[in-house]
Image: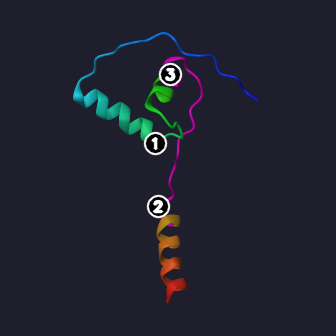
């Protein structure tokens, strides 16, 4: 089991509203559960898992669920 050390140091950063929105948008495209986890991985150049959605598959599944309910 992976043990994680306690994080005891703070890093304060000020952002413009636009910068924050861009960072938050990119964070939402990953599998990170917390914004701090995302920022930490980016700053330390660790690998990130990006979520890619297949739009045509989403459309197909929506249509399939409609057929199933009929």
Label 1 packing within 10 angstroms: few (<14), some (14-19), many (20+)? few
- Separation of residues labelled 2 and 1 (CA atoms): 15 Å
Q: Is residue 25 above or below residue 1?
A: below
> Helix, strand or loop at disc 2?
helix
Q: Tell me which residue sits at (51%, 37%) in the image.
A: 33
Residue at the spot 24% in from the left edge and 30% down from the top edge? 18
Residue 29 painted magenta: no
What is the span of residues highlighted in magenta in the rendered image? 41-56
Q: Which mark is residue 40?
A: 3
Q: Are marks 2 and 1 in contact (CB under 8 Å)?
A: no
- In the rendered image, the quadrant that contains the N terminus is top right
Residue 24 vs residue 34: left or right? left
Query: Does 50 appear above or below 44?
Result: below
**CB within 8 Å, label 2 to label 3:** no
N-terminal of the pair, mark 2 or mark 1, is 1
In the rendered structure, does residue 48 fall within the stretch colored magenta? Answer: yes
Badge number at residue 55:
2
**Marks 2 and 3: which is nearer the front?**
3
Mark 2, Cα crowd under 10 Å, few <14 / some 14-19 / many 20+, is few
Q: Judge depth for marks 1 and 3 and give the one in front.
A: 3
**Above or below 61: residue 5:** above
Label 2, label 3: how far apart the Cα atoms are: 30 Å
Earlier along the polypeptide chain: callout 1 or callout 3?
A: 1
Q: Residue furthest bottom?
A: 70
The x, y position of residue 29, in whole percent, is: 46, 42
Determine the CA span between mark 1 and mark 3. 16 Å
Q: Which residue is mark 1?
A: 29
Which residue is at the front of the view, 24 or 60? 24
Between 8 and 66, the residue placed more toward the observer is: 8
User: Tag 3, which secondary structure?
Assistant: helix
Comes first in the chain, label 2 or label 3: 3
């Amino acid at each position: 089991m992976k043990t994680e050390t306690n994080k005891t140091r703070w890093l304060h950063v000020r952002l413009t509203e636009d910068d924050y929105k861009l960072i938050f948008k990119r964070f939402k495209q990953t599998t990170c559960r917390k914004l701090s986890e995302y920022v930490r991985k980016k700053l330390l150049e660790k690998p990130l898992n990006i979520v890619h959605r297949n739009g045509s598959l989403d459309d197909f599944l929506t249509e399939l669920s409609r057929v199933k309910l009929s």
